[in-house]
């Protein structure tokens, strides 16, 4: 079958590399793709946030049998609904279900209503009421803009002054745009963080291996928040006991809650979790594969990804046994100088002599005059597998060092985090 993958990041390149291994898949199309994806797929230049334009394109291209929607924006805009209404098969939640990521106020209310463990919170639409609350609440405190804000709508405030200033920026100065007209003010939780992703067809939920993201730009989790500077899988503190707790108290209750709300979720549910002294708690839900989590999860998948995608769409996920490799995988993101703030594009990338086994996931790359140049903040994910995280990280870094472009930077400590956390 021929498959269209929506998106143009490292995550999509990881999905495409996994689909390429499937005997079921003939040609892969990517909307819009990048210079690396161009080697594995036919690029389609349509704005994927224009859901009608995507629907028209798929209508016109009868060769497409199946579409995979990975980014949050087209999911929240209802691209899966649009494709299904035209009779096409598509993987991803519909608009009603994608709200679990698109609105933090919705997801917090869902967790409160169905007793799913999360940080205590209050939601405000009026600045004066929020300011009065923040004047008295426990500190540190976390402020979250309600809508999608590219992972940047969260402020961790260590002092009351910071919280008051942050609230003003969100609600009065509209620093995060319309996303800031409603703000969630949340209790500050402490503990190691893990991304627990799972496939679900609304009846069955099957977890993937866990992974840990590194969101800050600089080593030791310093610097600004980014889309993610690297990942490793699996999380050392997430063993069978924690997996059981998360399945019983978080994953299954979430699937049931979405059904009870008439918002059956089909696709990838991403649980951003924290292991606190009071047990596992949900920090956030995403309605999709994580980036760069996917880059370390899918290389470890033994089962045919296309078979899983089809089983989810056909609501027979219970029939598929999902298997994972032992060992670990590490992804180091190479970023443009200045990211996540302003940065220059169009820098030529040289790759050196990379080990054959390294998995390169292109993110912000483009082809220009026969050369591969940078075209985004996160440029490449250099991924490697090993018997354990240590071996995988050595291989990933040995290859990252061989790549260069003007202004390139990367964190040197991916995979070191949580070494001292008690293993499970
Ligand atoms: P989010 O965009 O919701 O993933 O938040 C970004 C990051 O902020 C998370 O990965 C956490 O590291 C941190 N964070 C969010 N909520 C909390 C919380 N209630 N307590 C502590 N840290 C948090
Ligand atoms: N890596 C975080 C995310 O995909 O939201």
Image (cartoon, rainbow, N blue to C red):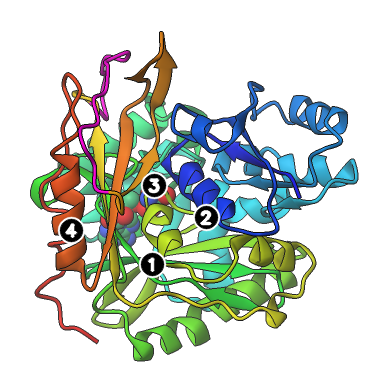
Identify the residue position indicated by label 1 in the image: 120
- Kindly check if marks 1 and 2 are in contact, taking CB atoms under 8 A apart as contact: no
User: Residue at 50% across / 40% down in the picture?
Assistant: 148
Q: Which residues are magenta?
A: 339-355
Up/down of 316 relative to 100, above or below: below
Identify the residue position indicated by label 2 in the image: 18
Q: Could you tell which of marks 3 and 2 lies nearer the N-terminus?
A: 2
Up/down of 351 relative to 414, above or below: above
- Kindly check if marks 3 and 4 are in contact, taking CB atoms under 8 A apart as contact: no
Does residue 351 belong to the magenta stretch? yes
Image disc number at residue 144? 3
- Kindly check if marks 1 and 4 are in contact, taking CB atoms under 8 A apart as contact: no
- Closest to the observer: 52 or 225? 52
How many neighbours does mark 2 have within 10 angstroms: few (below 14), some (14-19), or many (20 or more)? Answer: many
Give me the C-alpha separation between circle 3 and circle 1.
13 Å
Give me the C-alpha separation between circle 4 and circle 2.
21 Å
**Residue at disc 2, secondary structure:** helix
Magenta region, main secondary structure: loop
User: Residue at 13% across / 48% down in the picture?
Assistant: 398
Q: Could you tell which of marks 3 and 4 lies nearer the N-terminus?
A: 3
Up/down of 357 relative to 257, above or below: above
Q: Could you tell which of marks 1 and 2 lies nearer the N-terminus?
A: 2
Horizontal relation, residue 296 to residue 315: left or right:
left
- Closest to the observer: 321 or 100? 321
Give me the C-alpha separation between circle 3 and circle 4.
33 Å
Give me the C-alpha separation between circle 1 and circle 4.
36 Å
């Amino acid at each position: 079958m021929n498959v269209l993958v929506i998106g143009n990041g490292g995550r999509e390149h990881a999905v495409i590399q996994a689909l390429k291994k499937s005997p079921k898949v003939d040609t892969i199309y990517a909307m819009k793709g990048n210079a690396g994806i161009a080697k594995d797929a036919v690029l389609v230049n349509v704005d994927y946030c224009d859901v009608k334009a995507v629907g028209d394109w798929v209508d016109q291209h009868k060769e497409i049998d199946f579409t995979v929607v990975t980014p949050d924006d087209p999911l929240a805009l209802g691209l899966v609904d649009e494709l299904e209404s035209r009779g096409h098969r598509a993987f991803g939640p519909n608009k009603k279900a994608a709200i679990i990521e698109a609105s933090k106020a919705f997801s917090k209310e869902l967790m409160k209503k169905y007793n799913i463990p999360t940080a205590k919170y209050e939601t405000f639409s009026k600045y004066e009421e929020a300011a009065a609350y923040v004047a008295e609440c426990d500190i540190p405190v976390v402020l979250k803009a309600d809508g999608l804000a590219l992972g940047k709508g969260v402020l961790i405030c260590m002092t009351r002054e910071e919280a008051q200033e942050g609230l003003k920026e969100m609600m009065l100065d509209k620093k995060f745009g319309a996303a800031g007209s409603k703000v969630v003010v949340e209790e500050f939780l402490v503990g190691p963080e893990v991304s627990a992703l799972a496939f679900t067809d609304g009846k069955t939920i099957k977890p993937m291996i866990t992974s840990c993201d590194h969101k800050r730009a600089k080593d030791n989790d310093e610097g600004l928040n980014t889309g993610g500077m690297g990942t490793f899988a699996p999380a050392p503190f997430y063993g069978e006991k924690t997996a059981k707790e998360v399945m019983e108290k978080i994953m299954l209750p979430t699937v049931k809650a979405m059904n009870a709300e008439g918002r059956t979720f089909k696709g990838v549910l991403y649980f951003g979790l924290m292991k606190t002294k009071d047990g596992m708690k949900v920090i956030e839900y995403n309605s999709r594969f994580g980036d760069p989590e996917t880059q370390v999860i899918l290389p470890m998948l033994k089962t045919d990804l296309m078979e899983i995608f089809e089983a989810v769409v056909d609501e027979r996920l219970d029939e598929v046994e999902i298997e994972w490799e032992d060992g670990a995988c590490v992804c180091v993101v190479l970023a443009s100088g200045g990211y996540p703030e302003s940065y220059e594009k169009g820098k030529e990338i040289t790759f050196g002599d990379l080990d054959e086994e390294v998995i390169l996931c292109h993110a912000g790359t483009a082809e220009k005059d026969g050369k591969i140049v940078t075209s985004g903040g996160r440029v490449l994910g250099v991924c490697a597998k090993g018997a354990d995280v240590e071996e995988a990280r050595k291989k990933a870094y040995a290859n990252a060092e061989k790549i260069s472009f003007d202004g390139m930077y990367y964190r040197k400590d991916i995979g070191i985090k949580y070494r001292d956390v008690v293993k499970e």
